[in-house]
Image (cartoon, helix red, strand yellow):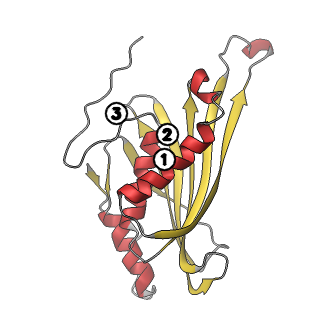
């Protein structure tokens, strides 16, 4: 497991609930296959926000299996839409095998991964919603020799029940790994790298 050591620096004048959420993000334990980095946070959605980008790799230097964004919003005044002061907004994209990508249940499965990840990490949340989209890319002309690809995209958001952001980030990172096709890793076990056969 990889421990996130530092993201957005602590600023003394930030509201305590948001500072508490940032501390949780720093303490999150993330699988070694996931590379996290801070990205610019949206400025119009809430007075306070932090955003992370993620890439999942099979092995160091190997192919990218999935990408995503995790955004934590905080509005001290609360939001009637969110039904709370915090909101997590996420995005995940991964390529699928053609037989999986054409399965009409793939969107429902993607949503199930989200719910199960949050429950497995005992993340307190409410008012979850999202959309799953399949993107079929076909090549023509000079690119006709390239194989067709099918990607799955999940856009989802939910309202954390408290400033404890650690569980939410860890659950989301596991979800990105599920999209990447990586098997779940039991607590205390380090996954062996998968070998891609040619």
From the image, state whether disc 2 or disc 3 is nearer to you: 2
Asked which secondary structure carries label 2, the reply is: helix
Residue in the picture at 60% in, 36% down: 106
The mark nearer the N terminus, 2 or 1, is 1
**6 w.r.t. 62: above or below:** below
Which residue, given by chain and number where applicable, does mark 1 sit on?
Answer: 113
Which residue, given by chain and number where applicable, does mark 3 sit on?
Answer: 60
**110 w.r.t. 47: above or below:** above
> Looking at this view, is 184 or 136 the one in front?
184
Which residue, given by chain and number where applicable, does mark 2 sit on?
Answer: 179
Asked whether residue 10 appears in the rendered view, the answer is no
Say whether residue 126 is left or right of residue 60.
right
- Residues at discs 2 and 1 in contact (Cβ within 8 Å): yes
- Residues at discs 2 and 3 in contact (Cβ within 8 Å): no
Residue 5: where, in percent of width, then height? 29, 61
Residue in the picture at 23% in, 49% down: 187
**164 w.r.t. 169: above or below:** below
Disc 2 crowd, CA 10 A, few/some/many (<14, 14-19, 20+): many
Residue in the picture at 19% in, 48% down: 188
């Amino acid at each position: 497991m990889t421990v996130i050591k530092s993201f957005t620096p602590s600023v003394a004048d930030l509201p305590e609930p948001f500072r508490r959420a940032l501390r949780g993000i720093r303490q999150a334990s993330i699988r070694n296959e996931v590379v996290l980095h801070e990205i610019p946070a949206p400025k119009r959605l809430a007075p306070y926000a932090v955003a992370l980008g993620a890439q999942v790799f099979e092995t160091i230097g190997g192919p990218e299996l999935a990408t995503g964004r995790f955004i934590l919003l905080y509005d001290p005044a609360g939001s009637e839409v969110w039904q709370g002061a915090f909101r997590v907004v996420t995005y995940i994209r991964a390529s699928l095998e053609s037989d999986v990508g054409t399965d009409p249940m793939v969107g429902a499965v993607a949503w199930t991964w989200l719910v199960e990840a949050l429950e497995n990490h005992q993340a307190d949340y409410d008012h979850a919603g999202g959309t799953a989209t399949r993107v079929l890319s076909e090549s023509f002309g000079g690119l006709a020799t390239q194989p067709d690809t099918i990607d799955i995209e999940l856009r989802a958001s939910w309202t954390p029940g408290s400033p404890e952001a650690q569980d939410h980030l860890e659950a989301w990172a596991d979800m990105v790994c599920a999209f990447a096709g990586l098997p779940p890793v039991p607590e205390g076990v380090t996954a062996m790298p998968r070998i891609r056969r040619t």
